[in-house]
Each structure stands twice: as C-alpha cells, then as structure tokens.
Image (cartoon, helix red, strand yellow):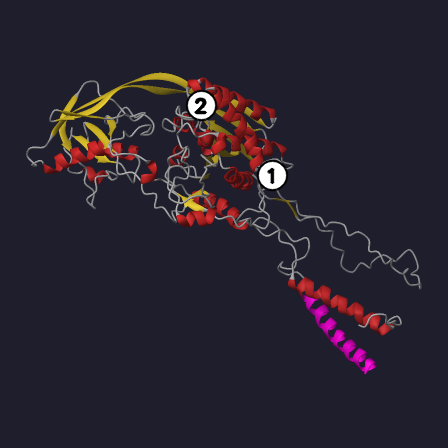
Amino acid sequence: MPRYTLHSPPSRARRASAVLAAGALVGGALLSAPAAFAAAAPGDSPEDLGLTGADVMTHLTELARISESFADDGYRVWNGPGYEAAAQYAEKVLEDTGAFTVSRQVFEVDTPEFGEASLTVDGTTYEGSHFDNSEGIDAPYTGALALPLSADGGRLGCEPTDFADIAAGAIVLVQRGVCSFEQKIDNATAADAGAVFIYNNERPPEEEASPDDQLTNVTSGARNPDDSPAATLPQSSGDTLAALIEAAPADAPVEGTAVIEKQFLTTKTFNVIADSIAGDPDDTVVIGAHLDGVAEGPGVNDNASGSAAVLALAEKIAASDVPNDKRIRLALWSAEEVGLLGSTAYVADLVENDPAEWERISAYLNYDMIGSENFTVGVYDANRSTYPAEGVTIPEGSAAIEQVYTDYFDAIEQPWIDTEYSGRSDYQAFIDNGVPAGGLFSGADDTKTAEQVQQFGGTAGVFMDRNYHTVNDTLANVNTDAIDIFAPAIGHAAADLAWAAVEEPPVEPSPEPTPGEPSPEPTTEPTSEPSPVPSEEPAAVPSPSPSVTTGPGANGPDRGDLAATGSDVEGSPLPAIGLGMLAIGVIVAAGTAIVRRRAHE
C-alpha cells in the first residue's frame, strides 16, 4: 500500500468478510493446537521444588567449614568430633524447617585396631596392608598357596567356580579388579580358604601408583566374623608370588605363613533420621546421603555435597505450597566410609525388629558425590543398559526410578551417562532387601574419556575427581557447575516420587427433567431492541478452573491419572468447529480478494 493514501471506511460486506476471515484464523488455531488450558505435556516443565545449586552451596559451605575446623581430629570421620559437629548442624537445619521430626539412630560399630599384615614365603616376607573390616588371625597361619582360576584364565576370583580346585585351608592370592573386594573374599570363604591376600593390579598412569605401593584405605564391606581372614599386597609382591605358585609342581605346592594381626573394639555412632510430618505414613520414600568422611581429608565432595543437597531439599519440601502425599524420610548415614555400616544397620534393624515399617518403604534415593571437579552427570544404571551389574540384585521398580532422572535430563536437554549400578554405596542394603533404588553420581576415580569431555567439558585422561579421599577434597575443588545441574534433578526426583496427582471429585450432574413436563414460562417479555454494542476493549477472560489439582510431581513420567483437556481430548468438539470455521474463512477471504482486485483494475 502506497504511503500517504487516504481510504474510505470499509463497507459492511468487507467488515463481515474480515470477521469471518478472523474466525477462520481462530478455527485454524483450534484445529492445530490444544486449548490454552491444556495440561502441560510430561517433561515440558519438570517440577524440581525450586531446588538450586545455590541452595546446596549454602549448606556445603558450612559443612566444609566444620570439617576443616576438625582437621587435627580426623575431619568428619564417623567416630570423631567433626562428625558430631556436622550432625548437630544438620539436625538444627532439619528441625528449623518445622516440617520434620528428627531423631538419632544409634548403632554399634566394631572398630578395628591394626597390627602386622604380611605373607612370608621361602624366607622372604612380603609386607601387606589391611582391609577395614576383614577378619584377622589369632596366630601365624601356615598353608599351601593357591590361585583362583576363571574360565578366561584370569585370577580375579569373581565367581565361586574360580575356586573349584582350591584345597580347603589354602592361602589364596587373588588379583584386584572387576568385582568388589567383598565378593572376592566371600567366594574364597565359601571355598574354606585359610587366608586371602588380594594384590593390586596394574594401575592407570594417572593414579601415579607404582607396583610397590600398598593397597590402602580400602574396605571389604561390613564386618562378617565368618569370613576367611584377609589382607592386601602390592602388585609387585602379588605378581612375584603368583609366578612362584604357577611354577611349582602340583604335588609340591609353595607354602607360606600369613600374619594378619587385628582386633575389634566396639564403638557407638549414629545416623540422623528426619521424617516428614506430612505424607502418608504407609508409603515412605527414603532419601539419603552419607555424612561421614575419611580421616585423610575434609571430604567436601565425598560426601558433604550429597548431605548438603539433602538439607537443602528438606527446606524446599517444607516450603512447598502443596504438602507431599507420601511420607519423606531423609537420612544422613554414618560410617559409610568403613563399609556402608550406617545404612546397613538401619535396614537390618527395620527388617529384624519392625518388618511392617520396612514394608512401608517404597523407594530409596542415594546421593554420594555430586560436585566432582572433572564431573560427569551419572545416573545409576538400574536397567543394565550399559553395565551388566553381574551379581547385583536390582529390585523391580529401580529402572523406573532411573527413568525419573533420565526423563528429567532429556526434558531440559542435559546430557547424562549411565553409572554402574554396583551396590557400592548406601543403597546396597536397600536393594539387597527388595526396595527399589536409584541415584546420581558425579564421578570419583574413574578416568574421563574424550567423548565425556564433549558432553560435559573438563579434561580427558584424568580422574573425574583427583581429590577423592585426599586432603585436597576441599570446597575450592568442588565444581559448582555440577552442583547446579544435580540440585534441581534431586528436587525433581523427590517431587516425582513423593507427590501424586489428585483428581477433584466429579461434579454431580443436574437432575434430569421429568419427561413430558413443559419448561416454565418466562417471567419477562423479550425485548425487540438489540443488545448494546459491545465495547471495543474485551473483558478480561477468567482463568478456567483446572480439571485436576496436582502436586509438584504431576509432570513426571507415566502420569496416566491426569485428566486430559484441550483440543486433543477424545470427543472434543473443538477440531470440528475449527475445521468448519477455517473452510468458511478461506472461501470468504478468496471472494473478498477477487472483489477488491476488480475494484482496483
């Protein structure tokens, strides 16, 4: 249209055609899109309770300060004053929410005191080290040396059949790798081994471990007095002894004398348990992290990070406008670093002493290290899509929990990877007793790959956390980008599992009119005058009443209980209306264009 050209007002016919054309556009919109009040599709806006990395960092900063202040007393080690101070801080945070009842679960720990660990063969003594909770020997023990043998020729001892040819009472040398130390010792025990020495394997260069380095700061799980005595050896010692055993004639095996000096003292510690006041007590979701650390460092990532997330989550649960439908139990475990002892004691107590309460637990979520400096976004691989998790019991429902996390990350286009569902954290006792579990993990002493760098940034060829179990596990070495990613995912999982969509009661239909009864006569005469001309400004359209009320978890996966609304509802008239209006509008608009063109020719 040329500028500065004046036009007369449109004719009545053109006004009518414009109205119909506009109606066509509305009809097209009705045809092609759901109504404005349609429920959001799952994943469009995942609920996360508003939990942020900043919320987690508030508590992580304080736990780091507490840990550093007890550097001379083992930082936050489970039986030290640093753990007590951290627990008191956590208890205050939980109590101040007003939404939880907080208690301590006291349990006993058999605390080891170590002496010598060695194996002497042909006059040469090979010095070893101790597992935290393995058994000792009352006096030096002499027996024939033997090696397990797997189907592929390995010496890993991960299967009971690897010990099929081991004579009862033998001192068995087992190589580190593939399965847990606990599993190797259990298999040797089943073969009636007199003692077990697990020797280190060749370590990745980034570990900077020499073949002569001792295998230290390791655990073989919770103490089992029925296990065969066990200790560790360096790689060089194990390789030398394995060569001697293989070279010896079958009728003249090499003999050795094992010394594993150890005694256990009974010490008490405690878990911090917080039960939500809201929620169905017959359906409990447990969310936990271990609060203790190792004596070698402040343990800020391992695992003040997970504990801080639990505390921040408690505050968001308390602040929610919609109370949780299920009871939420938050747990801060003690003595994880010496064999998952806190969570194991908790589960054992319920299973033995209150099985009805144990049956009320429907899920467990675990958060152990979420701020690794060279992080990946790891989700426990409950559906075994990447890791076979051989020998690990994965209860039904665990894969669905995994999907809660993966659907969330997919919805926000956040890359993620599977992390091994190994049972080597505080979820082990839960899955061993049939409760489905899941969780997140930012990485420890696994080497980051080039592909993972493309996904998450960082450095390839080095550990995901080079500060793992060292004095450098400080607040300064926590990756806040990782915390920012993990925090809302933790909030989302809680919302998805502990809140449920609740449908409003159906509206009672109005009574059916009695057949044959005439409708009442109108009390006023109809007017012949038309209604007043509507104002040009439309009145504000009120928000429609939703057909469901939902808690924070309503947008999670598999929400079949949500009422459907909008143009995609089966039986909805909107598509038909839209199609009719669109057809009329197209015809009218075409006719109008022809008329207008002829007027300008």
In this picture, residue 311 sits left or right of residue 539: left
Q: In the displayed structure, does residue 217 sit left or right of residue 552?
A: left
Residue designated by label 1: 50
Does 43 appear above or below 320?
below
The question of residue 381 being in magenta is answered with: no
Pointer 1 local density, CA inside 10 Å: few below 14, some 14–19, many at least 20: some
Quadrant, the N terminus: bottom right
Counting from the top left corner in percent of width and height, residue 109 is at 37, 20
- Mark 2–mark 1 Cα distance, whole angstroms, equals 29 Å
Q: Which amino acid, by three-letter code, is at mark 1? A: Gly
What residue range appears in magenta? 576-601
Q: Which mark is residue 285?
A: none
SS assignment at label 1: loop
Quarter of the image where the C terminus is located? bottom right
Dot 2 crowding, Cα within 10 Å, few <14, some 14–19, many 20+: many
Which numbered tag is attached to residue 76? 2
Q: Is residue 584 magenta?
A: yes
User: Disc 2 on helix, strand or loop?
Assistant: loop
Q: Is residue 335 left or right of residue 562?
A: left
* Type of amino acid at the residue the image marks with label 2: Arg
Q: Position of residue 446 (x, y in %)?
A: 37, 40
Residue 438, visible in the rendered structure: no
Q: Nearer the viewer, residue 514 or 165?
A: 165
Question: Closer to the N terminus: mark 2 or mark 1?
Answer: 1
